[in-house]
C-alpha cells in the first residue's frame, strides 16, 4: 500500500513493502527526489527523508502521519481482511500467527499450506527472528538483523524443532502456535468449510438423474452409517419431482420408505436434513422447530415465495400443526420424582449412611453429572451409593458383618 501526505508544504509518498524473507513490513519514503531507502519503521523512513530535505531534526510519528490513528482509515484498511494476526503468549515468548492454512496432514494438527508464524528468542547468543511456515513441507528460518542464520525443512513442526538445541520444554507444534486453543478453533472451522466445498449438490431439476442421486445419498446417508435405509429411498425425490406442490412435511415424507410407526433418532433426521439440503431443498418452517413435531421444506430454487406464504398462513391461524408436548410442558411426574428423593435426603436422620442407602435406589441408573445437578452432592457419596447397590441391593440394608475388637 502507498500513502501520500503533506508535511511542511511538501508531498511525501510512503510505501509499505513486504520483506519476503522475514515476512515483516518495511517502509520506503520519497519526496522531491530524496529517498529514505528501505527502513524497518514508517517513522524511520519519513524522518530520514524529511531530514534530507529540511536539514533539521524534526521528528514525526510514522503511523500517525500515515493515518493509522484514524478509526475511519483503519476500518477501511481491515474491511477486506479475512484473517487478523493472533498473538500467543508462551511463558516469556510471544508467538505471532500471521497467516493460516489448513490440511489433513499427519502431525500438523489441521494446519496446512499458507500457515505462517513468527517468534523472537535467542539463537547462538543473538536475539533472532524465527519464521515458521508450512507449504509442501514445514520450514524454519532464523534471522538476525536480516541475515539468515539457520534453515531447515521437514515433514512436521515437531521434527524440525527436534534438531535445535533450544526451547526443549516445548514441542514444535506448540512453538508453531498450531495447538493453541484459538488457532485450533479457526482451523476446525476452516476445515469444515473446505470439506463443504467438496460436497456434491444439485437442484430439483436433476432429480431424474439417478447417478447424481446415488452420489449424494452415498455422501450424506451411507458415509454417516445411518441404518435402516431402503433401496426405494430415491422415490422420495422422484415422487416429489412429479408433484406440482413444491412443499412437503418433514419427517412425514420419510414414511414413504420407513415403517409407519418407526421411531427416528436425531442422528437419522440430521442426516436426512443434510441430504435434503444437498438436493437443493430449503427448510421454510415458520415457527420454532423444537416446539412442533414437523418441519416444512420446499424444492423451489427460490424459496422466498413459499416461505412468505407459509408464514402468512401460520400467523393467521390457518396452518394447524401438532405441538411437541415434551417441549411445551414440563414433565410433572419427573419433577415430583426428583423432589421426593430430595425431601427424603433432607429428612433422613441416619446421617451419611442413610443418604447412601437412599441414593443407592437410583445411583446405578443416572450419571454422576445428573445426580450432582439434582442433589448438589459430591462424587464420593455417589460412588458409595453405587457400591452399596451392587453389594446389598438398591435401597437395602447393609448386609456386611461388623467385627468388634476382641469379638
Image (cartoon, helix red, strand yellow):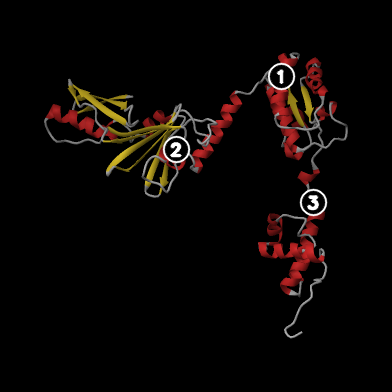
Q: In the depicted view, which residue is nearer to us: 18 or 44?
A: 18
First reached walking from the N terminus: tag 1 or tag 3 = 1
* Quarter occupied by residue 203: top right
* Residue 214 in the figure: left or right of residue 82: right
Residue 124 showing in the rendered view: yes
Q: Which residue is mark 2?
A: 159
Residue at image coords 11%, 30%? 55
The residue at which mark 1 appears reads as 300
**Where 357 sits versus 241, above or below?**
below
Question: x, y percentage for residue 354?
Answer: 76, 71
| Residue 145: % across, % down | 26, 35
**Disc 2 element:** helix
Question: Nearest the camera: 317 or 92?
Answer: 92
Q: Are marks 3 and 2 in contact (CB under 8 Å)?
A: no
| Tag shown at residue 283 | none
Q: Residue 128 location in percent, x, y?
A: 30, 39
Q: Nearer the viewer, mark 3 or mark 2?
A: 2
Position of the C terminus, as image quadrant, is bottom right
Res 367 → quadrant: bottom right
The x, y position of residue 402, in whole percent, is 77, 77
Q: Of 159 and 87, which appears nearest the observer?
A: 159
- Within the image, what quadrant is residue 193 found in? top right
Instruction: Name the element at disc 3.
Output: loop
Q: Image point 22% across, 33% down: which residue? A: 44
Residue drawn 73% across the image and 28% down it: 222
Circle 3 residues within 10 Å: few <14, some 14–19, many ≥20:
few
Measure the alpha-carbon separation of dots 1 and 3: 39 Å
Question: Residue beneath label 3, please?
Answer: 331
Relative to 192, 394 lies left or right: right
Quadrant in which the N terminus is drawn: top left
Residue with the most extreme left position: 55
Amino acid at each position: 500500500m502507498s500513502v501520500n501526505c503533506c508535511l511542511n508544504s511538501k508531498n511525501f509518498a510512503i510505501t509499505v513493502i513486504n520483506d519476503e524473507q522475514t515476512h515483516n513490513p518495511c517502509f520506503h519514503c520519497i519526496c522531491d527526489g530524496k529517498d529514505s531507502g528501505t527502513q524497518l519503521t514508517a517513522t524511520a523512513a519519513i524522518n530520514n527523508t524529511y531530514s534530507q530535505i529540511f536539514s533539521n531534526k524534526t521528528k514525526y510519528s510514522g503511523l500517525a502521519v500515515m493515518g493509522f490513528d484514524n478509526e475511519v482509515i483503519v476500518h477501511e484498511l481491515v474491511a477486506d481482511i479475512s484473517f487478523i494476526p493472533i498473538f500467543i503468549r508462551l511463558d516469556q515468548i510471544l508467538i505471532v500467527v500471521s497467516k493460516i492454512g489448513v490440511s489433513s496432514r499427519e502431525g500438523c494438527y489441521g494446519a496446512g499450506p499458507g500457515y505462517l508464524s513468527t517468534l523472537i528468542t535467542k539463537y547462538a547468543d543473538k536475539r533472532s527472528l524465527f519464521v515458521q511456515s508450512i507449504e509442501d513441507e514445514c520450514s524454519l528460518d532464523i534471522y538476525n538483523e536480516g541475515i539468515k542464520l539457520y534453515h531447515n525443512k521437514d515433514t512436521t513442526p515437531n521434527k524440525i524443532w527436534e534438531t535445535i538445541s533450544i526451547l526443549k520444554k516445548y514441542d514444535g507444534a506448540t512453538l508453531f502456535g498450531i495447538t493453541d486453543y484459538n488457532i485450533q478453533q479457526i482451523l476446525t472451522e476452516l476445515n469444515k468449510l473446505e470439506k463443504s466445498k467438496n460436497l456434491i449438490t444439485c437442484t430439483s431439476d436433476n432429480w431424474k438423474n439417478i447417478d447424481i442421486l446415488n452420489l449424494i445419498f452415498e455422501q450424506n446417508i451411507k458415509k454417516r452409517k445411518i441404518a435402516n435405509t431402503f433401496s426405494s429411498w430415491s422415490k422420495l425425490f422422484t415422487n416429489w419431482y412429479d408433484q406440482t406442490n413444491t412443499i412437503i412435511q418433514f419427517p412425514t415424507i420419510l414414511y414413504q420408505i420407513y415403517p409407519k410407526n418407526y421411531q427416528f433418532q436425531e442422528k437419522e433426521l440430521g442426516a436426512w436434513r443434510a441430504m435434503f439440503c444437498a438436493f437443493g431443498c430449503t427448510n421454510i418452517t415458520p415457527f420454532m422447530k423444537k416446539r412442533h413435531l414437523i418441519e416444512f421444506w420446499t424444492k423451489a430454487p427460490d424459496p422466498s415465495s413459499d416461505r412468505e406464504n407459509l408464514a402468512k398462513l401460520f400467523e393467521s391461524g390457518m396452518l394447524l400443526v401438532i405441538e411437541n408436548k415434551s417441549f411445551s410442558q414440563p414433565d410433572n411426574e419427573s419433577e415430583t420424582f426428583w423432589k421426593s428423593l430430595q425431601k427424603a435426603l433432607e429428612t433422613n436422620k441416619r446421617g451419611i449412611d442413610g443418604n447412601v442407602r437412599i441414593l443407592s435406589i437410583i445411583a446405578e441408573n443416572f450419571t454422576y453429572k445428573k445426580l450432582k445437578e439434582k442433589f448438589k452432592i459430591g462424587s464420593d457419596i455417589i460412588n458409595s451409593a453405587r457400591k452399596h447397590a451392587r453389594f446389598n441391593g438398591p435401597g437395602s440394608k447393609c448386609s456386611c458383618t461388623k467385627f468388634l475388637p476382641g469379638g
